[in-house]
Image (spheres, helix red, strand yellow):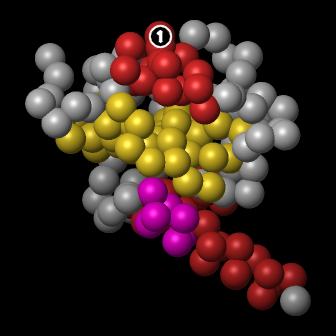
């Protein structure tokens, strides 16, 4: 039963990575890694894209970013702005925050306030994995500088 449960969990994580819109060949940069992140989701993104996640210090252009963000991590606007320089035109940031009732939960209103100030807009929110909600943040259609 253990192998079956692991297989089901792997399949679920893989399908969640696909629901986040990741595709084979994409390069994804990760911010906010800590011991509380969902390792299954991270592995699923790497498996689906065929690339290891780039760390915060990467300087190459990336197709998307995953940002693990908790209530006490600082200023969300500054964090989002810091994630933009490497993001390819049309790229998205998945802001992953602890779900309601979990330590570090971020109120949706904080994300709604921070995104436009950083030059982004929230396009959707999903249950990204067991403990994390995901908010898809995109640059305006008109582009950015």
- Residue at 21%, 41% (x, y): give it: 90
- Residue at 68%, 47% (x, y): give it: 132
Q: Which residue is mark 1?
A: 78
The correct choice, above or below, for 11 with respect to 124 in the image is below
Residue 91 visible in the current orientation: yes
* Magenta residue span: 14-20
Residue 60: quadrant of the picture: top left
Q: Position of residue 87 (x, y in %)?
A: 28, 32
Residue 117: quadrant of the picture: top left
Categorize mark 1 by other alpha carbons within 10 Å: few (<14), some (14-19), many (20+): few
- Main secondary structure along the magenta-highlighted residues: helix
Within the magenta stretch, is there residue 108?
no
Task: Locate the C terminus and report the quarter of the image it occupies.
Answer: top left
Judge by depth and name the residue closer to the eye, 48 or 17.
17
Left or right of 21? Residue 70 is: right
Residue 33: quadrant of the picture: top right
Within the magenta stretch, is there residue 18?
yes
Q: Position of residue 26 (x, y in %)?
A: 30, 53
Task: Locate the N terminus and report the quarter of the image it occupies.
Answer: bottom right
SS type, badge 1: helix
């Amino acid at each position: 039963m253990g192998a079956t449960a692991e297989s089901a969990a792997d399949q679920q994580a893989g399908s969640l990575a696909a629901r986040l819109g990741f595709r084979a060949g994409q390069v994804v940069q990760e911010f906010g890694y800590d011991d509380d992140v969902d390792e299954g989701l991270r592995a699923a993104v790497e498996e689906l894209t065929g690339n290891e996640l780039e760390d915060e210090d990467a300087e190459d252009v990336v197709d998307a970013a995953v940002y693990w963000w908790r209530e006490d991590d600082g200023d969300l606007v500054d964090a989002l702005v810091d994630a933009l320089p490497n993001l390819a035109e049309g790229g998205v940031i998945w802001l992953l925050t602890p779900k309601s009732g979990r330590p570090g939960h971020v109120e949706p209103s904080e994300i709604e306030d921070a995104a436009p100030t950083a030059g982004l807009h929230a396009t959707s929110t999903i249950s990204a994995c067991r403990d994390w909600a995901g908010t898809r943040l995109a640059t305006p259609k008109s582009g950015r500088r």
